[in-house]
Amino acid sequence: MPCLFALATLIAPRLIIVLLWLFTSWFNGLFDTALWPALGFVFLPTSFLWYTAVQNWSGGEWGVLQIVLLVIALSIDVSPAGGRRR
């Protein structure tokens, strides 16, 4: 059961990115090439979602709250999947 939970948490941001890309115009005009969205999808999906949310919701204005939440998203993306055991 814990493996299913871990798998669901890894897939959820990527699933949201795919659904937003298919059914909305969320990503239109934010990036010049398809390289950055592809890299964000593969390596840092939570941070990529937060970056696009800031671009869409606040017009790209980065304040303290947006930066703090970006740091939290980055820590979610780069944190190890499992706890350390001795």
Image (cartoon, rainbow, N blue to C red):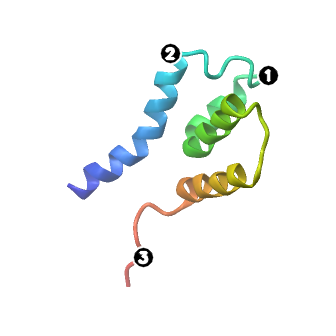
Residue 46: quarter of image? top right
* Residue indicated by mark 2: 22
Labelled disc at residue 32: 1
The answer to whether 49 is drawn above or below residue 18 in the figure is: below
Residue type at the position of mark 1: Asp
| Residue at disc 2, secondary structure | helix
Residue type at the position of mark 3: Arg
* Residue indicated by mark 3: 84
Q: Position of residue 43 (x, y in %)?
A: 59, 44
Question: In 3D space, how far apart are the residues under numbered discs 3 and 2 (Cα atoms)?
Answer: 38 Å
Q: Position of residue 31 (x, y in %)?
A: 75, 25
Q: Position of residue 28 (x, y in %)?
A: 68, 17
Residue 12: quarter of image? top left
- What residue is rendered at 37% in x and 79% in y? 85
Question: In 3D space, how far apart are the residues under numbered discs 1 and 2 (Cα atoms)?
Answer: 19 Å
Discs 1, 2 touching: Cβ within 8 Å: no
Which corner quadrant holds the N terminus? bottom left
The answer to whether 31 is drawn above or below residue 48 in the figure is: above
Which corner quadrant holds the C terminus? bottom left
Point out the residue furthest to the left here.
Answer: 1
- What residue is rendered at 74% in x and 24% in y? 30
Residue type at the position of mark 2: Leu
3 or 2: mark nearer the eye = 2
